[in-house]
Amino acid sequence: MAERREVARRVAVALTTDPRVPAYRRVLYALCLLAGVRSSEACALRWRHWEANVEPLGRLLVAGSWSSQRKAVKSTKTGSVRAVPVHPRLASILAEWKAQNPDAGPDDPVVRPPEGHVVNENTNRKRLHADLATLGLRQRSVHDMRATHMTLLEDADANERVWKRWTHGDPRDVVGGYLRTQWAVKCREMLKLGLPETAKSATPV
């Protein structure tokens, strides 16, 4: 079990920091690994959904999911809006990405691929497999990244009843824009998630 969790940490660090992975995909992977969102939800996020000035941690409002069939944003899988505390590492990644895209407005997508590229479940899967191969890591599914987020929280002894509020949602959790669960409590549990700054080695895992 300890070895499996160490592998999860190393994979998370590699996918979000290694310069061999294109920048926009590092952002996509960071959203899945550090906020626990589904890749389709990450593709639906707009910059207005990131409330960076909320204390003690910024807030990410997960309100939609990208539908490849409709080529439009639909409701989340559970139909609820989830408020996710933004881990300091993710906040740093988002701030750096925003600085690289100074013309991005509030309604522009956070995951902004180069011209001619598209992001959806199919392309996300193919590009993840390519990136894992480049990094010398074994193949994993896109959904595994969300599972890794939960594994890291479990490893940090974070309160499952609290963190499942932002990974799975609860219609009772957001009422009139205010959180029923105390925001400070959510932030405290998110801060338990710790990762080293960079990968220690390139050993295949």
Image: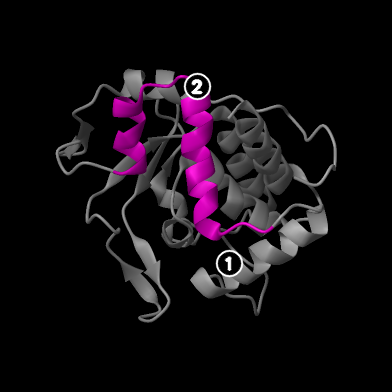
**Residue 56: image location, x then y, percent:** 43, 20
Q: Which residues lie in the magenta part? A: 139-168
- Residue visible at 59% across and 45% down? 30
Mark 1 lies on a secondary structure that is: helix
Q: Residue at x 73, y 60 (%)?
A: 131
Please check the rendered image and state whether residue 141 is part of the magenta-colored stretch, yes or no.
yes
**Image quadrant assignment for residue 123:** bottom right
Residue at position x 18%, y 28% in the image: 180
Distance of label 1 from label 2 (alpha carbons): 28 Å
Q: Position of residue 35 (x, y in %)?
A: 47, 41
Residue 174: x %, y % from top left = 20, 38
Number of numbered discs on residues: 2
Magenta span: chief secondary structure: helix
**Placement of 107 over or under 70, stated as above or below:** above
Examine the rendered structure and indicate whether residue 45 appears above or below residue 154: below
The residue tagged 1 is 124
Q: Quadrant of residue 40?
A: bottom left
Give the structural element (helix, strand or loop) at label 2: loop
Spot occupied by residue 49 in the image (x, y as percentages of width and height)? 39, 48
Q: Nearer the viewer, residue 133 or 51?
A: 133
- Residue 120 is at least partly visible in this image: no
* Quadrant in which the N terminus is drawn: top right
Residue assigned mark 2: 191
The answer to which of marks 1 and 2 sits earlier in the sequence is 1
Label 2: few (<14), some (14–19) or many (≥20) C-alpha neighbours in 10 Å: some
